Amino acid sequence: MSNAGVQGATPGTTGIVLHRAFLYDLFVWLVSLGREPAYREKTLDLAGLKRGESVLDIGCGTGTLAIAAKQRVGPAGKVYGVDASPEMLARAGRKANKAGAEVVFKNGIAEALPFPNGQFDAVLSTVMLHHLGSKARQQCAHEVRRILKPGGRVLAIDCARPAPGKKGLLDHFHHHGYVNLQDLVALLTEAGLKTVESGAVGVGDLRFVLASAP
């Protein structure tokens, strides 16, 4: 039996909050070009998750990545997911219970993460930052720096802007934001994090930055 649970009350955020869980899962399917399992495993590989680590997934949506992260870190590891949408978290809790995965989901916002200083070995931010304005992104990056353990790492993945004249797949469905690779690097650097690796994820226009705390 899983101990997955949802904690906290609905907070306020200046960013875009997705509430329709089905549409979120469709969004992830589109971002991954229909290869969600492979994209998810590649994400966890890039993060370098190890057994026994403490992990946070920011903007966890319906919890699929957090549940997969729990499988990576094992029984001794701890995984949390945070999202501003109670609807998303409710579905995430059901998914975790069905999978028998002990993941704690909290209602919270990226600009003020509900965790103490230095709690996590790894933080994941996947296709979330483009939902935030520039100030909220900076606040989120500083919050990530705060909650990481010394030497901890953050993996940020987001959609880069397509080449001029080329539409990304998501543009055919809704107005979609972008965060280019150099902007991801600059954002994390300004927050006091050091880039370890960066580049293309290998899925669509997705780019990643892996950075570490001092």
Image (cartoon, grey):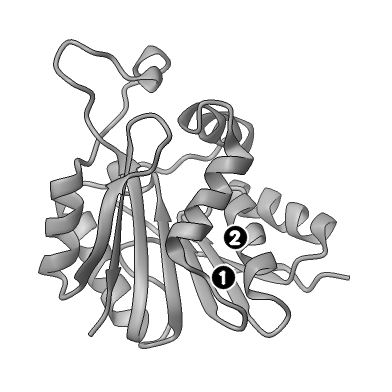
- Asked where in the image residue 137 lies, by quadrant, the reply is bottom left
| Residue 40 falls left or right of residue 122 | right
Residue sitting at the far right: 1
- Image coords of residue 35 (percent x, y): 58, 32
Residue 123 tag number: none
- Asked where in the image residue 201 lies, by quadrant, the reply is top left
- Point out the tag, 1 or 2, that comes first from the N-terminus: 2
Residues at discs 1 and 2 in contact (Cβ within 8 Å): yes
| Residue 40 falls left or right of residue 160 | right
| Residue 2 falls left or right of residue 22 | right
In the rendered image, the vertical position of residue 35 relative to residue 194, given as above or below: above
Question: Callout 1: few (<14), some (14-19), or many (20+) C-alpha neighbours within 10 Å?
Answer: many
In the rendered image, the vertical position of residue 29 relative to residue 80, given as above or below: above
Which label lies toward us, 1 or 2? Answer: 2
Quadrant containing the C terminus in the rendered view:
bottom left
* Residue located 82% across and 64% down the image: 100
Mark 2, secondary structure of its residue: helix
- The amino acid type of the residue labelled 1 equals Tyr
Mark 1, secondary structure of its residue: strand
- Name the one closer to the observer, 19 or 76: 76
- The amino acid type of the residue labelled 2 equals Ala
* Residue located 82% across and 70% down the image: 2
| Residue indicated by mark 2 | 66
* Residue located 37% across and 47% down the image: 128
In the rendered image, the vertical position of residue 107 relative to residue 78, given as above or below: above
| Residue indicated by mark 1 | 80
Viewer can see residue 5: yes
* Residue located 73% across and 80% down the image: 75
- Image coords of residue 1 (percent x, y): 89, 70
